[in-house]
Amino acid sequence: MRGIRHIDLTDVQLASSETARRINRDIVLELIRTSQPISRADLARRSGLQRSTVSQIVEQLIRERWVREGSVASAPRGRRPTLIGLNEDLVAIAVDIHPRQAIAAVVDLNGRLLSRALVPLTSDPEASTRLLLECMQRMMRAVSKKSIEGIGISVPGRVDPATQRLTFAPNLHWPDFDLKKVIEARVGLPVKMENAATAALLAELTFARMDGTRDAVLVTVSEGVGTGVFANGQLISGNHGLAGEFGHIPVDPAGPRCACGQNGCWETFASCNAALRYYRELQPKSRAVSFSDLLNLAEEGHSQAAQALEKQARWIGRGLRMILAALSPSTILIAGDITSAWHRFGPAIENEAATLTLSGEPPLIRPTHESEIARLRGAAALVFQRRLPQQRELPGDAIPKAD
Ligand SMILES: [Zn+2]
């Protein structure tokens, strides 16, 4: 706590009583989110704030519509307290874009999916966006009684944090196109975009309780391989949002051509498209299958399908070495369709990772909760995080008290 602390003078904001109030508000909102329904008295006990301060913050949160009063708690004697919970009438439209399709959903403040629809996409961004807009507008009409806070979009690529434009999306094959601007102009709601892996990681941090974890990497395995990085308690975006492109580090220069233009990137060996290629190599005369067909075939005892998936799993594990050496995370989360066959993938990935750990315990490797839903909840979290607490970005020093 003593001594010199690095302060970047290009972007400083002096601590004021306003800063302390904002931090306390964030803590109270986080306590409500994780312990709802909860009384004001319990909030005071849990936060260490005075009752009057808690009441003021709760009134503010009710005015802002983030929380609402709900049921009345039973108490042995005296006045029965009104319990506070998140306002589930606050929703976001979440869109998860894949190269050939998008999934749109209405997600509430608790991360629950209220509706969901599939939209086919093509390499024409304008035509694709038209279809997406029609779908979103249908969904919005269906929840017109709720308050729609914004639109969150997770994309298979990197988004520049400053411009919110796609800077790198080799699998999407879209020419330069300002998706955010087009949708905002048509719908009139704020749009937030983020890389799918980073969005899914944000969803895990927000909805799945990872308190105490300061170093985690989430790996999405789908048409490509993406990673979201949480290091030293911060989500990392890097210059132009390009940090964490482990999927495009070549692991074998003699390997197949990658969509990014290089040869033998990790994703050309570890993605679902790679598994389909392994299957075609083993079974050249087979009909064209999708990745979910491949998972089903393996479950039905088809040995070539199982071999193709095992090879993919080994390559996922092998590529984790780059992540372990670069970031030394305590937790690695895996998201994507492969998590539905975790009994097959989990042990193979863990075996590879255990032999690759440089020192000490290997990291915890686990599938994300509800695999594909993680990306949708992540897209919704992009909208809500603006005012959901950013506890992990607070300074490590003592939390100031407002009273
Ligand atoms: Zn590549």
Image (spheres, rainbow, N blue to C red):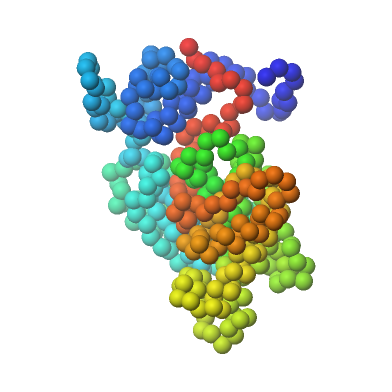
Instruction: Please identify the residue farthest to the right as the structure is shown.
Output: 253
Query: Left or right: where does residue 221 sit relative to residue 141?
Result: right
Q: Position of residue 80 (x, y in %)?
A: 23, 21
Q: Position of residue 384 (x, y in %)?
A: 45, 39
Please state which of residues 145 and 397 is positioned toward the viewer in this rendering.
Answer: 397
Please state which of residues 228 and 240 is positioned toward the viewer in this rendering.
Answer: 228
Instruction: Identify the image quadrant of residue 266.
Output: bottom right
Q: Position of residue 379 (x, y in %)?
A: 48, 49
Is residue 296 visible in the rendered image? The answer is yes
Total marks shown come to 0
Is 18 situated above or below 389? above
Please give the name of the residue rendered at 22% of the width and 20% of the height, measured from the top-left corner: 76
Query: Left or right: where does residue 338 sit relative to residue 81?
Result: right
Instruction: Identify the image quadrant of residue 157.
Output: bottom right
Please give the name of the residue rendered at 66% of the width and 59% of the height, measured from the top-left corner: 352
Is residue 180 visible in the rendered image? The answer is no
Please give the name of the residue rendered at 72% of the width and 23% of the height, measured from the top-left corner: 5
Instruction: Please identify the residue farthest to the top as the structure is shown.
Output: 403
Please give the name of the residue rendered at 61% of the width and 26% of the height, measured from the top-left corner: 395
Instruction: Identify the image quadrant of residue 361.
Output: top right
On-image quarter of the N terminus: top right
Q: Position of residue 301 (x, y in %)?
A: 48, 76
